[in-house]
Image: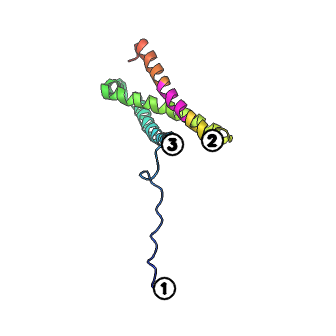
Amino acid sequence: MSDAAKPPRGRPLSPHLQVWRWHITMATSIAHRATGVALYVGALIGAAWAISLARGPEAYATFKHLLGSPLGKLVMFGLTVSFFYHLANGVRHLVWDTGKGLDVKTANATSVLVFAFAAAATVAVWAIAAMTGAL
């Protein structure tokens, strides 16, 4: 038997994004968190809308001008995507809470469905807005 001291073992490393192979359920999890943050920003925009209404016609006109700008429309488009994505993924999580849809094949299929629903619903809402003159 050897009397040589063994070097201390390195601390175990936690799995990280560089270690894991990306898969769609991982992307849906990250996107769910990101859209939740975006919806908080949307709530602040909603509060700014209410404040501008309370401050009078000039403040409201300024707010409308800001949101009607190309950057404002881009932000509102992003919030629309965030809303529909978060809604669809939330429903998916409710189904998971019942114990259904947890196998890999179903989870991957519902991930694709969540992304597809968010895209289709967003395009539909913005198309309706364009047709009714709301843009």
Q: Amino acid at mark 3?
A: Ser
Residue type at mark 2: give it: Asp
Give coordinates of residue 84: x percent, y percent. Answer: 50, 30
Of labels 3 and 2, earlier in sequence is 3
Q: Which residue is mark 1?
A: 2
Q: Is residue 57 visible?
A: yes
Residue sitting at 34 percent across and 28 percent down?
Answer: 72
- Magenta stretch: give its range: 110-119
What distance separates the C-alpha of mark 1 from that of mark 3? 50 Å
Q: Which residue is denoted by mark 3 in the rendering? A: 29
Instruction: Please tell me which residue lies in front, 1 or 26.
Output: 1
Q: Mark number for residue 119?
A: none
Kindly report which numbered mark, 3 or 2, lies closer to the viewer in this rendering: 2
Q: Nearer the viewer, mark 2 or mark 1?
A: 1
Q: Which of the two residues, 105 or 116, is positioned nearer the viewer here?
A: 105
Q: Is residue 85 magenta?
A: no
How far across and down, in percent of the image, does residue 58 sit?
Answer: 32, 25
Q: Extreme front residue here?
A: 1
Is 26 above or below relative to 12?
above
Give SS at disc 3: helix
Q: Earlier in the sequence, mark 1 or mark 3?
A: 1
Q: Secondary structure at mark 2?
A: loop
In the image, what residue type sits under mark 1? Ser
Element type at mark 1: loop
- Residue 80, located in which quarter of the rendered image? top left
Main secondary structure type of the part rendered in magenta: helix
Q: How is the image coloured?
A: rainbow
The answer to whether 45 appears left or right of 32 in the picture is left
Q: Residues within 10 Å of mark 2 (few under 14, many from 20)?
A: few
